[in-house]
Image (cartoon, rainbow, N blue to C red):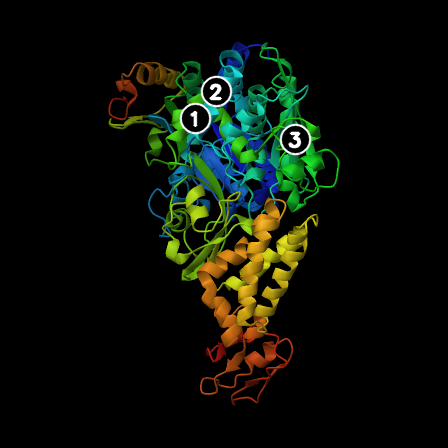
Amino acid sequence: MKSLAELQAIKDKMKDKVILREGVNDIRIVVGMATCGIAAGARPVLNTLVEEVNKEGLSDKVTVSQTGCIGLCQLEPIVEVFEAGKDKVTYVKMTSEKAKRVVEEHLKGGKVVNEYTVAGHKE
Amino acid sequence: MIRAHVLICGGTGCTSSGSQDIQKAFAENIESCGLSDEVKLVQTGCFGLCALGPVVIVYPDGTFYSRVTPEDVKEIVEEHLLKGRIVERLVYNDTGDEKVESANVALSDTAFYKSQNRVVLRNCGVINPENIDEYIAMDGYAALGKVLTEMTPDDVIKVVTDSGLRGRGGGGFPTGRKWALCAPNKADQKYVVCNADEGDPGAFMDRSVLEGDPHSVIEAMAIAGYAIGATQGFVYVRAEYPIAVKRLQIAIDQAREYGLLGKNIFDSGFDFDLHIRLGAGAFVCGEETALMTSIEGNRGEPKPRPPYPAVKGLFGKPTVENNVETFANIPQIILRGADWFASMGTEKSKGTKVFALGGNIEHTGLVEIPMGTTLRHIIYDIGGGIPGGKKFKAAQTGGPSGGCIPASLIDTEVDYDNLTAIGCMMGSGGLIVMDEDTCMVDMAKFFLEFTVDESCGKCTPCRVGTRRLLEMLDKITKGNGTLEDIDKLEELCHYIKQNSLCGLGQTAPNPVLATLKFFREEYVAHVKDKVCPAGVCKDLVSYTIEADKCKGCTKCARNCPVGAITGTIKNPHEINQTACIKCGACISNCPFGAIVKK
């Protein structure tokens, strides 16, 4: 170790890997992962969310978590976004592609993707 | 991409309750569920709640599972990690209520953790102690970097002095002053020594730091080396701490590989290296001069002071010796400043202190709290109170060198000076809680037995004096004592205190003096009335059967291991006092409460 910069580089590289343990962030995004959710394809959605959140550098603000059956099995995979002081947003019939847009527009941009929500989606 | 971390406690407490098997089971189940790329398994140091071990925490949600068995692991992996459903039955619930809705109690929400302020233990239970990168991610070695690139040795000593940090090993000597005394002494070689010879019965905070965050001690020792001009360090650690020794060695090797130990650290021209020395478990080797004698390869015996180690210490060279917990505070003080540290605690005792809670208390474990917290808060709010609804009688602090705090002083704010004022001692932080069933004479005898065993034998007051004390206590607990014995006991205590060579002898009579001060009436009851009020001292207790309550069920007679109970069925039984060994088996077996202990 010859410089502080080297130390900082290790710290930066590792920070993403330990930040999960620092507790719940302001924004929590939860994927329904009961049998119904998994059968409908929740796993790739979850993995995409984790990847995108890290890629966009949002991991210190957003916690990606999972939960059980929400009760709307026909609309799975369901993803819910909880943000302090705001109403919960429920996205339904999610896919990896849709997840990417949610991270980009909602989590990063602060704008709810209305067409994917339980109220806005089209049968 | 990793989306969840499973933290498994690898401290000594959880290891002995089987956490290695649990880790193996997790590895297998995560693999078989195809989650290896999504879930990371981390072995950490002690979380502090040893009574609930083995402990497992799942992040990001922070779910805190307690008393996990290998059979539970499959369920946790399949339900929680795969499907996101928390396994409620394993979640720790400190409310004592029926499981409430969303009983997802995170560790940080429990009463045990809420009042704590973790400085020394901040990384214990959070990082993998065998991975230097995780320590660096938590600001590790940033303090060493700052010291070597921005500060002069005098700056470092000033920050440590201003912080008000005092030695956590027991004495409470100001750390900054210790360094300042050593720094100006010229020598071709100086040393930094870390005292990890934790010997007090019931204390295990130093072990937990070495097991859970060994790099913090290494970093602090390098900082101390820079401050006093030493290039060589030794960690003296008990051989009875195999996990601590192993993780410390791994940490030293990793630090060397990264160039954080060795030559020209951070290109500053500063060299520092560390070695481990194993102690064979003699209590006296925790005394600083004896410890240095032992590192030199000699029999661990204390030396008279002066000369002080700051002038002539290890191998006759100027030496600074600090305790593990003291060192673990240093990197934080450097990074966050003296004012931050001094803002915690009381006027003369700054910062936090780690206590090992033990004895008659609900939550056995490690807690770190600001100095000045009341004993009541520690025992009832953090420790969860006394089991079985029993009454609090006293707390022993400082192990065999300390004294007891009686129930009447439970609102004492715990810091160095308050404890000294009531004839007690902070010691290394062992806190043994005793309930109403404890005999204080017996307790004093227990600690005296320890010091008699551990006296190194170099000076007469300690070698002979403590043995005489023990004999007198033995006489009293057997019911053969006289009132003069109590006076003689007290006189001898003062003599030993004044005349012993080292700290061990000077403090050995403390348990006797403190119990005499607060519980003299118990001593008097033993010699005058020949009774042990708590019913502990066997020679002073007798068991009798109350004839009107006894139904003659014969259960006591059948359970008596020595056949001391006689009687016929449906008639009151009797205990033969000369044959009775006072084991109490009859009381616990009597369905009618007919047997009384006096």
Give the residue type that dot 3 points to: Gly
Chain to which mark 2 belongs: A
Q: State the residue position of label 2.
A: A15
- The alpha-carbon separation of the residues under discs 3 and 1 comes to 25 Å
Q: Position of residue B184 (x, y in %)?
A: 57, 21
The residue that appears at 63% across and 56% down in the rendered structure is B466
Q: B163 or B362, which is in the foreground?
A: B163
Mark 3 and mark 2: span between their CA atoms? 41 Å
Q: Is residue B199 left or right of residue B594?
A: right
Chain assignment, label 3: B
At x 44%, y 36%, the residue is: B352
Where is mark 3, residue-wise? B313
- Observer-nearest residue: B65 or B325? B325
Secondary structure, mark 3, is loop
Label 1, secondary structure: give it. Answer: helix
Query: Which three-letter amino acid code belongs to the residue tagged 2?
Result: Lys
Q: Is A71 placed left or right of A119 in the picture? A: right
The reply to whether residue B559 is in sight is yes
Residue B67 visible in the picture: no
User: Is residue A120 found left or right of B584 in the rendered image?
Assistant: left
- Within 10 Å of disc 1 (Cα), the crowding (few <14, some 14-19, many 20+) is some
Foreground: disc 3 or disc 2: 3
| C-beta proximity under 8 Å, tags 3 and 1 | no
**Label 3 close to label 2 by CB (< 8 Å):** no
